[in-house]
Image (tube, rainbow, N blue to C red):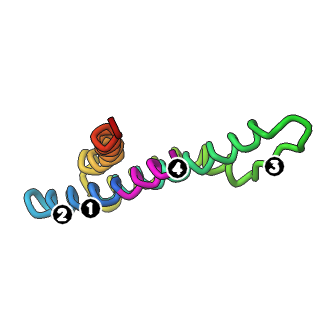
Amino acid sequence: MRAAEQSIGRLTLWLGAAAALAVGALLSVPAGVGVAIGAGLAWLNHRWLGQSLDAVTRAVTAPPGEPSPRVPAWTYFKFVARYGLIGLVLYVMFSRLSVPLLSMLGGFLALGAAAMAQGIREAVSRPR
């Protein structure tokens, strides 16, 4: 499962970069930058969510009789702060730097595309 999560993270960055280059070449450079920013934020969101859930899962699934691992406060912060960070970056990029909001939101779709590509890869490569 961990390998699939890492693969989705890498695919998010690769697909986001490819889409950013294509949008930058076909539409405009600010739109391409927006796609790259959106894909980067999607990757960061995926990474922080995965780290947070891994830490909480380790604490919850500790064997009976053993002390459960301590979940660092930073983990809870990342779990909640990822939404604030995304909102702040979107606001600043749209209002101050005139990067198209739609292109940044389109960059977020790189995570969904990466998850679908990983699912297809696993379905096709599964031994029969």
| Residue at which label 2 appears | 21
Q: Nearer the viewer, residue 4 or 93?
A: 4
Which secondary structure lies at badge 1? helix
Residue 95 seen in this snapshot? no
**Sequence-wise first label, 2 or 4:** 4
Measured as percent of width and height from the top left, residue 95 is found at: 34, 54
Q: CA distance from mark 1 to mark 3?
A: 37 Å
Residue lying furthest left in this view?
A: 26
Q: CA distance from mark 2 to mark 4?
A: 29 Å
**Sequence-wise first label, 1 or 3:** 1
Q: Nearer the viewer, residue 108 or 95?
A: 108
Q: CA distance from mark 2 to mark 1?
A: 6 Å
Instruction: Tell me which residue sits at (68%, 50%) in the image.
Output: 75
Which numbered disc covers residue 78? none
Instruction: Tell me which residue sits at (32%, 35%) in the image.
Output: 128
Measured as percent of width and height from the top left, residue 118 is found at: 34, 45
| Residue at which label 1 appears | 17
Badge 2 vs badge 1, beta-carbon distance below 8 Å: yes
| Residue at which label 3 appears | 70
Specify the amino acid type for callout 3: Arg
The stretch drawn in magenta includes residue 2: yes
Image depth: mark 4 or mark 1 in front:
4
Q: CA distance from mark 4 to mark 3?
A: 21 Å
Q: Which residues are magenta?
A: 1-10
Image depth: mark 2 or mark 3 in front:
3
